[in-house]
Image: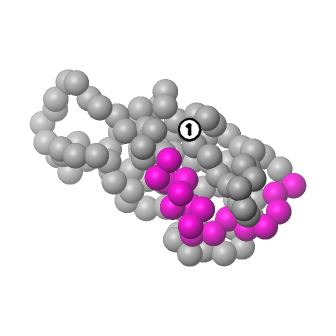
Amino acid sequence: MLRGKVNGSTVLAVLFVIFMAGCNCDLNPQPVTPTNAAGPPTVISTNPVKGATCVRNNSISALFSKAMNPATLTTSTVKVRGPGVTPIAGAVSYESGSHTVTFAPTC
């Protein structure tokens, strides 16, 4: 069972790990649109929102502005910890159509 809570700092730490691990460097340029403009992907939204409390046993998701490399989004690269430094077991999934990465805790 997952104990404690996942707070906004934990969500931000997870998003940073996802961002660093899943940046998709496309070698086939496409026309510039808001979702494939130059530069790294940005987080458009998260669930739960920053600062949320009492989110135990809920999934954490991040919607990115552009595609991520799904091969780099694994339980080795996406880690959730808390409270403290104890890793929380879970599964990572990626929805390429919406550019959404989700961490679902297993408890």
Relative to 55, residue 102 above or below: above
Q: Amino acid at mark 1?
A: Thr
Residue 79 among those drawn in magenta: no
Q: Position of residue 25 (x, y in %)?
A: 29, 32
Q: Quick one: which residue is furthest to the front in this view?
A: 85
Q: In percent of the image, x 73 and y 63: which residue is there?
A: 83
Q: Residues within 10 Å of mark 1 (few under 14, many from 20)?
A: some
Relative to 40, residue 70 above or below: above
> What SS does tag 1 mark?
loop
For this view, does 35 lie left or right of residue 58?
left
Q: Tell me if I can see residue 105 in this picture.
A: no
Q: In this orientation, which residue lies closer to the viewer: 98 or 50?
A: 50
Q: Quick one: which residue is furthest to the right in this view?
A: 1
Q: Position of residue 26 (x, y in %)?
A: 26, 29
For this view, does 91 lie left or right of residue 65?
right
For this view, does 106 lie left or right of residue 47?
right
Residue 13 among those drawn in magenta: yes
Q: In percent of the image, x 42 and y 46: which residue is there?
A: 19
Q: Quick one: which residue is furthest to the left in this view?
A: 31
Q: Which portion, as a residue range, is magenta?
A: 1-17
Screen quadrant of the N terminus? bottom right
Q: In percent of the image, x 56 and y 75: which residue is there?
A: 51
Q: Position of residue 74 (x, y in %)?
A: 58, 34
The image's colour scheme reads one colour
Q: Which residue is mark 1?
A: 77
Counting labels gives: 1
Asked which quadrant contains residue 28, the reply is: top left
Q: Position of residue 76 (x, y in %)?
A: 61, 35
Q: In percent of the image, x 51 and y 61: which residue is there?
A: 12
Q: Tell me if I can see residue 106 in this picture.
A: yes
